[in-house]
Image (cartoon, grey):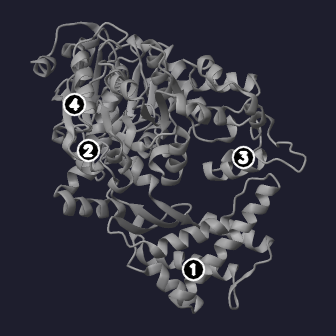
């Protein structure tokens, strides 16, 4: 407790003691703690005493740079010569040698690593191709540890480049000295990356303590990280690569383009026979049987063909690397896909054909627990979120062994938040665009926003609903300055829009539930006082979702809860949580969808006078019956 750098807030001391006890017992700690408790500093002060005693490390697992910055700030506040190293993945923009090269901008970490190895190679005269790496040989690592103490990721990189040394390689050299490492998920959950990371740290995972903040995102991340596929667009690029390289023979008279064409024909057949709306489940061995029939090969011959294609693609990538070009080969990627697909027989995977503008095959991972094995391998782990309930569901999904649980409610006055919903409208798929329902929804949306002159965020259940309403002129009917979260929006452009919204008055921010704005973005004081949520974000019933629901029905007996109700509840709570970020914040949340009443973890009450309740609450007038019902 002596490490804690601030005056304790309510429930904070309890949280620190709980984490410290769990870590000393070597057990996972799974915690739902409301906004304002100060989860980051509490986790650090609960884990560091044991780590400093034993000479081990805290691995603070992050997904965003803003999370890393928060970890660095709190470690700096703790002091006591604790060293935090903000580890970051490879990217061309963070490498002085690759920055500005449009080809490397789209490189994967693996491709950039191979290219980096070529830059670092010394020629016959002993000259290193990368001066930033070469200068590290003369660097005083102990001195650098003092220099970068307290520096956030951008400041760290700037210091390194000013001194002419490589930020990525210096971070690796500092890891053995670090007490806290703020590390992106892939370094721990991607097996190849984890092996390298552990070797750089100098201690095994078994001696580390891991902290997972915003843990509610972890199951989906692990599923997606283990999912792979191939698209028609990548097949076209593979075909071009094959032609440019002479279309080599693979097996007998079969050339590379013959195999690519066969995969394309199989994809067309799958789209015709098995696609239902967005996707479709493929029969067992569909692709293998299609390729054997089209190519006239046995399964053994196909295996040799895949291996030969991989070797050709690998050679192409190697030649590019030696020429200091991005070592990418679409043939190698296609071969890896075909080999993995043919070897996959895991019960927790489902093989799909996916439609859209760029259709393809996909092997979707339904179970995140196999990829989560490092969390049971480390000494202890701490899992925190403001929206983790039901905690038992998270524990089951991740597969944690013998965890301890803690639920801490909000530390803020409950009367500062109004959460209400309308019984009049529904955003259920079959109803959302019916004329009467749609008209009433847009009327309520416009009149609710105009009920008070405050900054407002409108969270839509999906981009498609947001786009439809914007096309129908909803922004013009509101008549205020508007900011938008667009699909695929660059991070800098998004953050610039958010900052301009924060500094404005009476503006409206249009965004989506589960998007970047609805999670992890703070809107202090008057920056956001009203949130209107248009629709409950139940996922669309695709073939993938149906397969996932059946899988969780089999495992836990509650497929609907795991794949639909729990994710929708968490997205709703995350969005509502943007309103109250301090003891003095006040805000109103309005849900335009009667289905919210079925979500037991979302605390809302019905209002028969949405506009009046919002106006009275935000202007300080006499409270309505709905407000009183919510707070009593």
Please say if the residues under marks 3 and 1 sit with CB atoms less than 8 Å apart: no
Please say if the residues under marks 4 and 2 sit with CB atoms less than 8 Å apart: no
Residue at 57% from the left image edge and 36% from the top image edge: 88
Q: Whole-percent x and y of residue 281?
A: 38, 71
Question: Of tags 3 and 1, which is closer to the observer?
Answer: 3
Q: Regarding mark 3 in the picture, which secondary structure is present there?
A: helix
Q: For the N terminus, give its image quadrant.
A: top left
Give the mark nearest the N terminus, 2 or 1.
1
Question: Of tags 4 and 1, which is closer to the observer?
Answer: 1
Q: Regarding mark 4 in the picture, which secondary structure is present there?
A: strand
Does residue 86 appear in this view? no
Q: Which mark is residue 265?
A: 1
Residue at 75% from the left image edge and 80% from the top image edge: 248
Residue at 73% from the left image edge and 30% from the top image edge: 165
Residue holding disc 4: 421
The residues tagged by marks 2 and 1 sit, at their Cα atoms, a distance apart of 41 Å
Residue holding disc 3: 116
- Horizontal side, residue 336 vs residue 24: left or right: right
Does residue 206 appear in this view? yes
Give the mark nearest the N terminus, 3 or 1.
3
Residue holding disc 2: 394
């Amino acid at each position: 407790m002596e490490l804690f750098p601030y005056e304790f807030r309510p429930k904070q001391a309890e949280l620190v003691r709980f984490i410290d006890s769990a870590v000393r017992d070597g057990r996972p700690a799974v915690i739902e703690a409301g906004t304002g408790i100060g989860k980051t500093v509490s986790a650090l002060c609960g884990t560091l005493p044991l780590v400093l005693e034993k000479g081990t490390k805290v691995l603070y697992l992050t997904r965003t740079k803003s999370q890393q910055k928060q970890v660095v700030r709190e470690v700096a506040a703790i002091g006591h010569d604790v060293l935090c190293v903000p580890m970051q993945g490879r990217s061309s923009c963070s490498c002085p040698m690759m920055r500005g090269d449009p080809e490397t901008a789209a490189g994967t970490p693996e491709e950039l690593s191979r290219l980096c190895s070529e830059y670092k190679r010394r020629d016959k005269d002993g000259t290193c191709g990368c001066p930033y790496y070469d200068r590290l040989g003369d660097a005083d690592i102990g001195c650098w540890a003092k220099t970068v103490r307290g520096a956030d990721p951008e400041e760290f990189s700037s210091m390194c480049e000013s001194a002419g040394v490589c930020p990525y390689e210096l971070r690796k050299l500092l890891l053995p000295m670090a007490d806290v490492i703020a590390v992106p998920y892939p370094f721990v959950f991607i097996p190849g990356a984890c092996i390298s990371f552990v070797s750089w740290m100098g201690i095994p995972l078994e001696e580390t303590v891991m902290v997972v903040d915003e843990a509610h995102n972890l199951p989906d991340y692990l599923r997606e990280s283990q999912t792979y596929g191939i698209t028609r667009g990548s097949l076209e690029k593979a075909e071009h690569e094959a032609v440019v390289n002479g279309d080599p023979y693979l097996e007998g008279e079969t050339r590379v383009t013959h195999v690519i064409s066969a995969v394309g024909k199989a994809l067309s057949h799958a789209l015709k026979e098995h696609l239902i709306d967005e996707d479709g489940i493929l029969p067992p061995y569909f692709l293998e049987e299609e390729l054997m029939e089209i190519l006239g090969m046995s399964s053994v011959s196909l295996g040799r063909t895949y291996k030969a294609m991989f070797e050709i693609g690998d050679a192409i990538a190697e030649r590019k690397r030696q020429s200091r070009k991005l070592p990418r080969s679409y043939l190698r990627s296609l071969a890896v896909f075909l080999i993995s697909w043919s070897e996959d027989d895991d019960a927790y995977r489902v093989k799909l054909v996916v439609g859209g503008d760029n259709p393809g095959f996909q092997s979707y991972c339904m179970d995140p627990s196999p990829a989560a094995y490092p969390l049971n391998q480390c000494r202890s782990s701490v899992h925190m979120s403001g929206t983790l309930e039901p905690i038992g569901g998270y524990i089951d999904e991740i597969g944690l062994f013998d965890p301890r649980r803690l639920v801490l409610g909000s530390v803020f006055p409950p009367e500062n938040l109004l959460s209400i919903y309308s019984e009049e409208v529904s955003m259920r798929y079959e109803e959302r665009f019916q004329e009467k329902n749609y008209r009433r929804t847009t009327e309520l949306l416009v009149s609710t926003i105009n009920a008070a002159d405050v900054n407002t965020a409108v969270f839509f259940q999906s981009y498609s609903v947001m786009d439809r309403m914007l096309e129908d002129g909803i922004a013009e009917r509101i008549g205020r300055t508007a900011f938008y979260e667009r699909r695929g929006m660059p991070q800098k452009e998004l953050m610039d829009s958010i900052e301009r919204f924060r500094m404005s008055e009476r503006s409206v921010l249009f965004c989506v539930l589960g998007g970047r704005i609805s999670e992890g973005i703070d809107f202090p004081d008057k920056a956001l006082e009203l949130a209107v949520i248009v629709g409950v974000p139940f996922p669309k019933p695709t073939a993938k979702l149906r397969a996932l629901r059946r899988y969780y029905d089999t495992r836990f007996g509650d497929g609907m809860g795991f794949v639909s109700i729990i994710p929708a509840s968490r997205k709703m709570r995350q969005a509502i949580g943007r309103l109250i970020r301090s003891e003095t914040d006040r805000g109103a949340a309005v849900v335009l969808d009667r289905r919210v009443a079925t979500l037991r973890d979302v605390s809302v009450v019905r209002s028969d006078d949405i506009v009046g309740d919002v106006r009275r609450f935000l202007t300080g007038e006499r409270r309505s019956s709905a407000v009183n019902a919510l707070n009593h």
